[in-house]
Amino acid sequence: MTLAPLVLIVDDETAIRRLLRTSLQAEGYRTAEAATGAEALARAQDADIIVLDLGLPDIDGLEVIRRLRANSAVPVVVLS
């Protein structure tokens, strides 16, 4: 059996993460969550795709993307 794609949801707002988690899981995706850019970078290696808010409390979302691109081609959907 093949595992469903893992979507990393990165947003500092709990309500938005919960909404995305519920919606994506209802469609059969697995989800992981991060509330900060640092958490996102730490968890990105396992993700098949990342849904990323640009306004994070520690690292700007654009900087998260720059750092990801240094060693990863994981797709990123910007949520703004």
Image: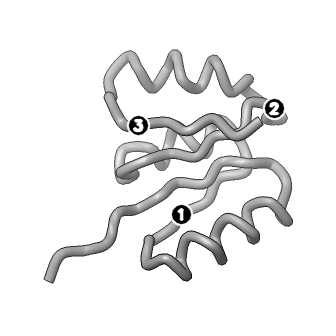
Above or below, 1 against 79 in this view is below
Instruction: Using a 10 Å C-alpha cutoff, classify the residue at mark 1 as few (fewer than 14 neighbours), some (14 to 19) or many (20 or more).
Output: some
Instruction: Using a 10 Å C-alpha cutoff, classify the residue at mark 3 as few (fewer than 14 neighbours), some (14 to 19) or many (20 or more).
Output: some
Q: Mark 2 points at which residue?
A: 55
Q: Which of 6 and 45 is in front in this view?
A: 6
Q: Is mark 3 on a helix, strand or loop?
A: loop
Q: Is mark 2 on a helix, strand or loop?
A: loop
Q: Mark 3 points at which residue?
A: 75
Q: In this view, does 80 lie to the left or right of 74?
A: right
**Where does residue 73 sit, x and y in percent of width and height?**
32, 29
Amino acid carrying label 2: it is Gly
**Alpha carbons under labels 1 and 2: distance apart:** 19 Å
**Alpha carbons under labels 2 and 3: distance apart:** 18 Å
**Where does residue 74 sit, x and y in percent of width and height?**
36, 36
Q: Earlier in the sequence, mark 3 or mark 1?
A: 1
**Where does residue 61 sit, x and y in percent of width and height?**
68, 27
**Alpha carbons under labels 3 and 1: distance apart:** 15 Å
Q: Which of marks 1 and 2 is nearer the N terminus?
A: 1
User: Do the residues bearing badges 2 and 3 touch, measured as CB atoms within 8 Å?
Assistant: no
Q: Which mark is residue 32?
A: 1
Amino acid carrying label 3: it is Pro
Instruction: Using a 10 Å C-alpha cutoff, classify the residue at mark 2 as few (fewer than 14 neighbours), some (14 to 19) or many (20 or more).
Output: some
Determine which quarter of the picture holds residue 18. Answer: bottom right
